Each structure stands twice: as structure tokens, then as C-alpha cells.
Amino acid sequence: MKQAGPDAAFQNAERAGAGGNWVGARRIYGRILKAAPRDWRGFYRAGLLEARGGHYGLAEKAFDRAQALSGGNATVAANLAQIYLFTERPIEAAGLLEQVAAEAPNSADIQRQLGDAYQQLDQLARADTAYRRAMDLGANEPALLNNYAIVLQARGKLAEAIAMLETVRRQGGDGVETLNNLANLYRTAGQSDEAAEIFALALSQAPLSVPLYRNLALLNRDRGASAAGLLAARRAAISDPADMDGLVIIAEILEHRADLLTAGRLIRRTIVGAPGNTDAVALLARIRRREGNPEAALAGLRGALSRAGDRPGAHKLLFEQAQAEQALGRFDKAFDALVTANRRQISAMPAGRVDPERAFDRVRALHAMVDGADAGVLAGPSRDDVGGSPVFLVGFPRSGTTLLDQVLDSHPSVRVLEERPLVTGMIGRLTAAGYAYPEALERLDDEMLETLREGYFADRDGFIEIPQDSVFIDKMPLNITHAALIRRVFPGARFLLVVRDPCDVCLSCFMQSFELNDWMAVFTDLAATARLYAAVFDLWFLTAEKLGLEHHVVRYEDLIADLRGTAAEAIQFIGLKWDDRMAAFHEHARQRGHLSTPSHAQVTQPVYGHAVARWKRYGGMMDEAARLLKPHRSALGYGD
């Protein structure tokens, strides 16, 4: 009988492997390799066979041998690199692929693999370049586009990431993973309606998916729909009782609604099931502190901090430690914890994901534009020519904008939309139309201005319904930097500017565990925060004077000392009169649902004054910031 050749024999081995008979498969290809021990192709095919079965250790040995015998064949190297990626060894994969890419620069597969390796290494700029090169070479498979979208999102390129995944959908790659990623991108971009629609589509395919329900809960939480958020989080918990993250979301929503008793019971249960869950431990510490027991908060944090070490998320425990130490009057210990928390949080970010210097660059560009612009052009037509202009509630973060927002929203004729990217949406439309922002602000024609107005209101209506004859207030603190754009689009815009002692503001920013972007990353350094504060208010002073902005200043300290008198002046500025319901703003805040700002704990209780002049209790630790802020404290009426 004629003996089968190597090809036929390997086919028999592959059939045996496909049927689960790996002993038989290895016996067959072992005979082939013994008969031709110097033929790299046999070892290569053996590696492919083992890789298909998920036996990566054996596959690696076979590919290593094939690589040595072939003298560095690019195809063998690519498969070996893939094994490195499967086994989470991206450094070895990247090193091998870089060598192969030098020899085969026009291989889309090699560039795609390089992108995967760089992504695992958190080298996002290099991953971006490699994925783009792979696409330029013709690669467009869903896996590549999904991975590229993740990199684009991490680099803050949300619009590009969304477009990438929408391309996957058009190609028919609308599986649950793609839909989940796309919905989360829309959520991050503030496009909540689109996110909700896609989550619904994904759940129609996977109605018991715990990650989908958990992410839907976060979406509803962010939209202020706390009841819907609780429902989605509870469905996640029911689908998988062992899923502690869903329980943490439920407890977090309850804590935001000031239901501390129920939130505390639930989070204690969660910690029993997952003692290493840093989000749960941090939330329990916050609840204990809000209940007036900072010692208990610290006791729960000590063990968790020692266990967490430098793991991701440990900075949240340190921020809570600082808050508890401050509540006990131990300001030196609180400051030490804050320094460590901020340093760990910023150092844990992959290189290039955030860059505080970009925030300063944007403020400098805006300042240069306003300084060199024609005031008459930027100010636009008569204020009476464009009706229905919103009121913009602005200020530096942690100045008291949320407190004023809640007081005003308690008025029956006021609707406040909290921190939604409506002005950012206008900037996106400008960029999409080919205008450079802010340089081209003077060159906008009437048609473009009308497009921006229509787009702004369309975005707004996706978040909130405004009853007829109600005053709409757009509350986004850092819109203070875009006052020139706002005035250009809405000549009748009015501004409510909330100010607070700049030293208290910067300290409070330094004390918060923000989700880091370029702006929030500045707040991980106290001196840098003071410099950004100074730059932002220099821009505001210039814009307000040059364009004659119609604005009213509300001092946080005055609002605390005389809520009715100060709020009555603010409400009169927007054309309304005081309503007694405004005095019960804290009850309104609890009924309003989830608040997306760090001030949720403060505005669900009556006003208090213990945050006024807090910076002075930190003594010499605030000396540098106080020196940097001295001119602006004086300009805003906070002299010594």
C-alpha cells in the first residue's frame, strides 16, 4: 500500500484534532517531523494545528523550531507573535513584529498585529499609527475596527471611534460586543438617545447580558433617570447574583439620592462577597463619613489600602481617606493622602491618554483669539435680533455652580440642564464644517450661525423637555472658557457667573477623584490648578469686558450666608421672582434623582458654612497656591 505523503498525513492529523483526538493527531504529525526533522514547514503546520486547539505552549514550541529552521520566515514570526499576544506577552510580540515589519512593510496583517501589541502595552499613539497603516493597506475586518475604536476612545477621539464602529455595523458586524462598545461610546460622548437605542438593540440579541444591563444602568444614572438606572442595575444583579459591580451601581445611585441607610446595607453585603472591590470600600467609607462617623470610615479604609497597594483604583480609597482625615481636623494627614492619591491616579494613566498642557494650550488659544478679534464682529447683531437665548451658568469647577443650579431649578419656571456637552457639540459642528476653532470664530456667516443654533437646541431637546414660558439654564462650569463662542451664536445670552474664594476652589479641585481628561488631569497638581484658574479668569475678564457680556456674579459665600437674598438677585437677573420652593432646594435635589457632579452630597442637605475658608486650615500647605492666586483673589473681592 502506498504511504500517504506529508500533506495527506497532516490532513489526517487535522481531522483527528478537529474531532478532539489530540493524542492521535500528535502521533501522526510526530511521525512526519521525525521523517523530516530539518523541514521548517512541518513544524509550522504542527504549530498551526496546536494553536487552533488552544494549546498555545505546544504551538509556541513548534513555531520556535520552525522559526529557527527557516531563518526567520515572516509568516512563522507573525504566528509566533500571535501566540505571544494570546498569552499576554505584548513586549515579546512587539519586538518580534517590529523586526518582521521592517522586512515586510506593506503587510496589513503585521501592522494589525503591531497595533494589537501596542494596545496591550498602552502605547496608544503607536497603536493608532499601526492600525491606520493596516487600514491604508486594505485591512477592514471587524476585529481590527473594534480594537482601533478602543484606542481612539482612549485617546479622546470619540467621534472617530464612533464612526469606526458604525462602519462595522454597516458591514454587518453588529454583534453584541460591537453594539455594547458603540453604545458606551455614545454614552461617553453625551449622546444618550443614541446610546439607549443601541443598548436596546443589543439586549434584544442578549436579553440576559449582565454587562449590557450594567452599562445601561450607568447610562440612565448619567441621564438623571435614577429609577431606570436602578431597574437596569437590579436586572444585572438578578441575572448574575455574583456580579458585585451591579450591586455597587445600585448602592451608588441610592447614595446619590441620600438614601444612606439602604445604600449602606447593600454595600456591606457587596463587600462581604467581594472584599477587594475598591469602589465598594470607597463608597462605604463615603457613606460612613456622611453619616457623621469618619473614624469608622478610616477603620474600613486601612485594611483595604494595605491590600490594594498600587493596583488600579486604589487612589479612590486615598481620596476617601483624605476626606475622613479632614472631617477629623487632621489636615496634615489629609493633605498627605491627597498628594499620594493624585500622584497615583495620574501615574496610572497610559502615556498620551491625558496631557494637562493641552488644557493650558486651549485657554491660550482662546485668549489670543479674543484679544486679537474685532469686538463688533464677535459681539454679533443687536441682542434683540436673536430671541430665545439660553442662560449659561458658568464658573470654575468646585465654585458652587451645583448649589446655585439646584436652588434655581427648584423654581417652577426654571429648567436647568446639568453638564451636558451642548457647547462642545457646537464646536464639533464647526470642525466638521471645516472651521478651525477658535481661530475662525470671526468668519462665521449667518447660515453657519443658524446651523449652530439649531444643532444646539436639537441636542438640548434630546436631554430635557422645556415647558413653554420656562427659562432654560445650561449649567456647564467650564463653558466659561467658551463665552466668546456663546456670545457669537447667541447675542442675547446671559451669564450667571458663580465665584468662590479661589484658594478654596483650587483646594477642592485637588481633593476630588475626577475621571481624568486633559482638564481634570490639571487638578492632580495643586500649583497647576492655581495656574489654570488664573488663566481661565484672565480669559473671562478679557471676554466680558471686550464683548460687554451681560452677566451677574453670585458669590458662593454670600449664597451660604444669605440664601434667599442672594438667590433672589440671581432669579431676578433672569427675569423671575423669588419662589419659596427655592429655599427647600435640598428636598428638590433628592427628588430630582442622580446628580452627576461631585457636589451631590452637599446639595441634598441644607446649606452649611464649614467649606468656607477651608484652605486656611491647611496652613503652609497652601502657601504656593495662595501666592499664585493673590491677584485673582483681589480682583474677585477676596482680599486678606
Image (cartoon, rainbow, N blue to C red):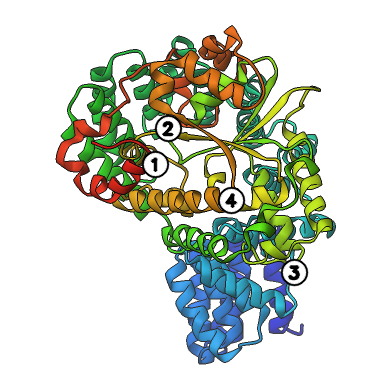
Residue drawn at the location 54% of the way across and 29% of the way down: 243
Classify 10 Å Cα crowding around label 3: few (below 14), some (14-19), many (20 and above): some
- The residue lying toward the viewer, choosing from 290 and 452, is 452
Q: Amino acid at mark 2?
A: Asp
Residue 351: quadrant of the picture: bottom left
- The residue lying toward the viewer, choosing from 235 and 227, is 227
Instruction: Describe residue 435's horizontal placement relative to residue 343 as left or right.
Output: right
Q: Which residue bears the numbered disc 4?
A: 482
Tell me if residue 329 comes above or below residue 43 in the rendering: above
Residue drawn at the location 42% of the way across and 62% of the way down: 357
Classify 10 Å Cα crowding around label 2: few (below 14), some (14-19), many (20 and above): some
Q: Is residue 528 visible?
A: yes
User: Which element carries disc 4, helix, strand or loop?
Assistant: helix
Q: Amino acid at mark 1?
A: Gly
Residue 573: quadrant of the picture: top right
Q: Amino acid at mark 4?
A: His
User: Is label 3 in contact with label 1 (beta carbons under 8 Å)?
Assistant: no
Q: Going from the N terminus, do you reach mark 4 or mark 2 first?
A: 2
Closer to us: mark 1 or mark 4?
4
Q: Which residue bears the numbered disc 2?
A: 279
User: Which element carries disc 2, helix, strand or loop?
Assistant: helix
Instruction: Describe residue 629's horizontal placement relative to residue 369 as left or right.
Output: left
Q: Which labelled disc corresponds to residue 140?
A: 3
Q: Going from the N terminus, do you reach mark 3 or mark 2 first?
A: 3
User: Which element carries disc 1, helix, strand or loop?
Assistant: loop
User: Is label 3 in contact with label 2 (beta carbons under 8 Å)?
Assistant: no
Q: Going from the N terminus, do you reach mark 3 or mark 4 first?
A: 3
Q: Which residue bears the numbered disc 1?
A: 313
User: Is label 1 in contact with label 2 (beta carbons under 8 Å)?
Assistant: yes
Q: Which labelled disc corresponds to residue 187?
A: none
